[in-house]
Image (spheres, rainbow, N blue to C red):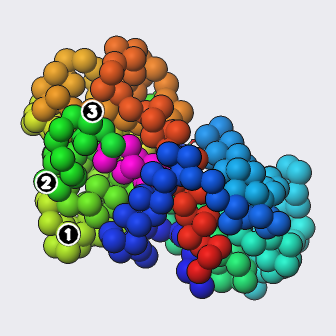
Amino acid sequence: MKHYITTADWKQSELQEMLDLAQEFKQGLDDESLKNKSVALLFFNPSLRTRTSFEIGTWQMGGHAIVLEPGKNAWPIEFELGSVMDQQAEEHAIEAAKVLSRYCDLICIRAFPKFENWNEDRQDKVIKTFAKYASVPVINMETITHPCQELAHMQAIQEKLATQGKGGTKNKKYLLTWTYHPKPLNTAVANSSLLISSKFGMDVTLLCPNENYLLDERYMNLAKQNVEQYGGSFQVTHNIEEAYQDADVVYAKSWGALPFFGYWEPEKPMRDQYKHFIVNEEKMALTNNGIFSHCLPLRRNVKATDGVMDADYCFAIDEAENRLHVQKAIMKKLINQ
Ligand code: CP
């Protein structure tokens, strides 16, 4: 039984199959793969797009989704194996995963890092524990990667490049730019951006303020491995003009510097120096008629200007729509395996 926890577990051809299926859903495919089936949506963190698109997608495929928020409308859950549960948690993930598997046909989980210790968070224990003890497929709704966002992003890129007459993704210049945010955010979407762009043969540039903002070596290395397997290239730069020059796709995300995980006070004055990483019209003018997106939510005029967000080249809303289509494709694929 295969889960959908990271796209690193899936070949490019398998992901393209799901993208093709997502395109069929977008064009109106009526499919009842979830008829008389139920989907558990476990949210340890807030959401607008993910919750709405999973609930509606499940309903459109004839199924029923139930939203659980551990610690709010469901019992707080413990994940450490062997722990003495004398703190807040009322039940262990072992029982939660096994019980939900008796009721539900899919289990979807959103569990962000705790932002205290990256060496702990990078182990992705919450979703891995569920996957270990569940007897149904598990889908990642964002932990330390965001693989549903990845597919929605890639579906939109393929659509937009085709509309522009630029063809496919191979060797198109893809820029992932760090942007300022007043708070240190999750690296999940940035990790995912590297994974999916490199898996589809793009020439990937990671732009970040300095080496403190490099992403986890696991994802940097996976991007390099993808380049070897699927073509394209991968480079890191701290030079804004060089990064934007001739880019076909610009993707923006803010994240906290990994070396400062758990003691963010000294990171803030450093991060505050880089507000000029905002995506604006002047930077976009350097691109090769480039298109722009962000996973959303986005703070306007902090991460990207109104001018960029309202421009025709911004496809953030199309990408958000695609969440619905790709997740239906993922659920159909996993339920029918
Ligand atoms: N992009 C995304 O996952 O949005 P939500 O956090 O609103 O679900």
**Looking at the image, residue 198 lies above or below residue 165:** below
Q: Element at badge 2? A: loop
* Any part of residue 177 in sight: no
Three-letter amino acid code of the residue under disc 1:
Tyr
Q: Secondary structure at mark 3?
A: strand
- In the displayed image of the protein, which residue is found farthest to the top? 307
Mark identifier at residue 27: none
Viewed as shown, does residue 90 lie left or right of 169? right
Residue 54 image offset from top left, x and y in percent: 67, 51
Residue 78: image quadrant is: bottom right
Residue plotted at (16% across, 21% down): 285
The region drawn magenta spans 149-158
Give the answer, above or below, for where 118 lies relative to 256.
below
Q: Which disc number belongs to residue 230?
A: 1
Q: Is residue 237 left or right of residue 269?
A: left
Chain-order first, disc 1 or disc 2: 2
Q: Is residue 291 visible?
A: yes
**In the image, residue 277 lies in the stretch drawn in magenta:** no
Q: Magenta: predominant secondary structure element? A: helix
Query: Amino acid type of disc 2?
Result: Asn
Task: Name the residue rendered at 76%, 57% in the picture.
Answer: 62
Can you say which quadrant of the picture contains the C terminus? bottom right
Residue 204, image x, y percentages: 20, 52
Residue shown at 54% from the left, 60% from the top: 329
Q: Which residue is mark 3?
A: 291
Which residue is tagged 2? 171
Residue 316 located left or right of residue 225: right
Q: How far across and how far down the image is residue 65, in percent?
A: 79, 56
How far apart marks 3 and 1 lie (CA) works out to 23 Å
Residue depicted at x 34% and y 61%? 195
Which is more N-terminal, label 1 or label 3?
1
Look at the numbered disc 1 and give the secondary structure of its residue. Answer: helix
